[in-house]
Image (spheres, helix red, strand yellow):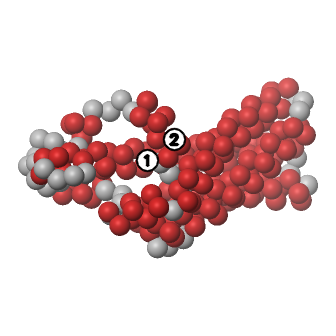
């Protein structure tokens, strides 16, 4: 639930991996290796659906928005924990971050349905979706603690930090999948070129 378009340029800039060594170019030029094929995220039909649906752009916009909200909220939460001031601002920022998370989860499930035929736990993103449930659970637990008043403000902030830590892990999972998708497409272009076929 974290797709290619607006973040692809950034990934190109930071991806320093030697794709020539990882793509199997040393193997026979007319067919991808079995190991490479197993790493492929999209079939040609799934890629067509991914590129055709407007939900891909929605996800591509929401992902960096969520990250920006996360950074601001993290600063406010850490400031409160360090100084004891700014509780209202920190609380509001966590609520906004959680709303954005819910939004990207719902729209991401729709995207997954459009591309893979199921709302969650498609094979290509199974473990990312599993970890997303943990992220969602921790953010929801924060809201429950906030609105019930059963947890002290400082402990609420610590619960939010646990959710943010899980979010960072989950975001890293999706970035790695984005890189894998880019590598798949680069490998396919290489093999098409070797066969003399249009990419």
- Give the percent coordinates (x, y) of residue 80: 83, 32
Pointer 1 residue: 178
Badge 1: residue crowd in 10 Å (few <14, some 14–19, many ≥20): some
Q: Residue furthest left?
A: 28
Cα gap from disc 2 to disc 1, whole angstroms: 9 Å
The quadrant in which residue 116 appears is: bottom left
Identify whether 84 is placed above or below 25.
above
Identify whether 143 is placed above or below 112.
above
Identify the residue at horizontal 56%, vertical 49% (top origin): 60
The quadrant in which residue 88 appears is: top right
Q: Nearer the viewer, residue 156 or 121?
A: 121
Q: Which circle, 2 or 1, is nearer the viewer?
A: 2
Pointer 2 residue: 7
Compared across the picture, whether 91 is left or right of 48 comes to: right
Q: Nearer the viewer, residue 96 or 12?
A: 12
* Labels 2 and 1 touching (C-beta < 8 A): yes
Who comes first in sequence, dot 2 or dot 1? 2
Identify the residue at horizontal 69%, vertical 58% (top origin): 103
Q: Is residue 103 visible?
A: yes
- Give the percent coordinates (x, y) of residue 100: 71, 52
Compared across the picture, whether 4 is left or right of 76 comes to: left
């Amino acid at each position: 639930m974290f797709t290619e378009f607006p973040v692809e340029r950034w990934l190109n800039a930071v991806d320093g991996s030697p794709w020539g060594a990882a793509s199997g170019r040393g193997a026979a030029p007319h067919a991808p290796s079995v190991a490479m094929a197993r790493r492929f995220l999209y079939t040609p039909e799934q890629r067509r659906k991914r590129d055709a649906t407007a939900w891909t752009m929605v996800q591509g916009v929401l992902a960096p928005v969520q990250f920006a909200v996360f950074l601001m909220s993290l600063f406010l939460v850490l400031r409160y924990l360090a100084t004891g001031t700014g509780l209202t601002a920190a609380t509001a920022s966590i609520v906004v971050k959680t709303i954005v998370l819910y939004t990207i989860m719902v729209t991401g499930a729709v995207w997954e349905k459009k591309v893979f035929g199921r709302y969650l736990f498609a094979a290509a993103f199974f473990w990312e979706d599993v970890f997303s449930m943990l992220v969602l659970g921790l953010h929801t637990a924060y809201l429950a603690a906030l609105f019930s008043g059963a947890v002290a403000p400082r402990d609420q902030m610590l619960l939010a930090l646990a959710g943010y830590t899980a979010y960072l892990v989950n975001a890293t999972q999706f970035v790695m999948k984005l890189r894998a998708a880019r590598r798949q497409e680069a490998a396919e272009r290489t093999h098409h070129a070797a066969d003399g076929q249009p990419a």
